[in-house]
Image: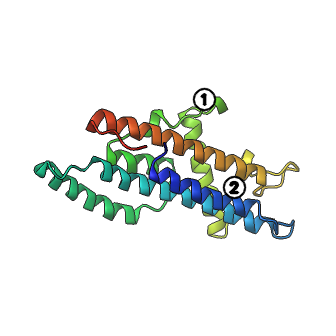
């Protein structure tokens, strides 16, 4: 069963998919919907990381262990402050945020063997997605990556490229859920409900 954070992510990525598949997506306004879809996909990933860290604290708390509970609450307060500043969920920031605030390092889980993506390739793709979102959010030209090129070679977002982004981020969510579940079980001896 997925974490609550993953369930929320699945709902949000579904909204991004609706934007991509919008029936009003004609040639004249397709890029507007595609940009909105990519922005929604990145927002879903960002929210997932935020919600997962909150959920981690929820499942690892034990009010019966008074000394531990006070330290736990102190760390939760520090994490809440850090969550407000977390706004660029690229590979480095997402990984560092998870390591610092949960102790879980996703580096070994952020791979996609069936797509031939080792850690370095996953890192590169996640950072590309954030660069593309950043570029159009700030009025810059979209960077040229294989997934941002149309069949004619024009640099732009395509439905196919967005499908790849959705699949990629969804894979990372599933892998992160599995990894943090194992982390919580092994380190905190708690079995999460996901």
Q: How far apart in space, not on screen, are marks 1 and 2 (Cα)? A: 26 Å
Asked if residue 108 is positioned above or below residue 47 in the image, the reply reads above
Q: Quadrant of residue 189?
A: top left
User: Disc number at residue 22?
Assistant: none
Mark 1 or 2, nearer chain start: 1
Q: Position of residue 35 (x, y in %)?
A: 70, 64
Answer with left or right where residue 43 lies relative to residue 139: left
Nearer to me, 171 or 191: 191
**Residue at x 37%, y 53% (from the top left corner):** 55
**Residue at x 64%, y 30% (from the top left corner):** 114
**Residue at x 43%, y 56% (from the top left corner):** 51
Answer with left or right where residue 145 lies relative to residue 57: right
Nearer to me, 142 or 192: 192
**Residue at x 64%, y 57% (from the top left corner):** 14
Nearer to me, 181 or 115: 181
Q: Is residue 160 visible?
A: yes
Mark 2 secondary-structure assignment? loop
The quadrant in which the C terminus is found is top left
Q: Is residue 141 visible?
A: no
Q: Residues within 10 Å of mark 2 (few under 14, many from 20)?
A: some
- Marks 1 and 2 close (CB-CB < 8 Å): no
Answer with left or right where residue 84 lies relative to residue 173: left
Mark 1 secondary-structure assignment? helix
Q: Quadrant of residue 17?
A: bottom right
Foreground mark, 1 or 2? 1
User: Disc number at residue 113?
Assistant: 1
Q: Residue furthest left?
A: 67
Q: Position of residue 107 (x, y in %)?
A: 45, 36
- The residue labelled by disc 2 is 143
Asked if residue 68 is positioned above or below residue 20 in the image, the reply reads above
């Amino acid at each position: 069963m997925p974490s609550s954070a993953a369930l929320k992510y699945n709902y949000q990525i579904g909204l991004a998919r609706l934007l991509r598949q919008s029936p009003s997506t004609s040639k004249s306004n397709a890029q507007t919907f595609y940009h909105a879809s990519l922005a929604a996909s990145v927002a879903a990933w960002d929210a997932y990381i935020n919600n997962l860290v909150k959920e981690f604290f929820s499942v690892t708390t034990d009010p019966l262990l008074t000394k531990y509970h006070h330290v736990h609450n102190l760390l939760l307060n520090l994490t809440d402050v850090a969550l407000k500043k977390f706004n660029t969920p690229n590979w480095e920031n997402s990984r560092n945020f998870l390591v610092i605030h949960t102790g879980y390092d996703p580096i070994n889980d952020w791979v996609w063997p069936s797509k031939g993506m080792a850690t370095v390739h996953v890192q590169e793709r996640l950072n590309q997605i954030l660069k593309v979102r950043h570029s159009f959010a700030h009025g810059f030209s979209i960077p040229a990556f294989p997934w941002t090129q149309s069949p004619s070679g024009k640099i732009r977002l395509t439905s196919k490229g967005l499908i790849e982004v959705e699949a990629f981020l969804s894979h990372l969510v599933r892998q992160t859920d599995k990894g943090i579940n194992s982390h919580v079980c092994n380190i905190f001896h708690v079995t999460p409900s996901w």
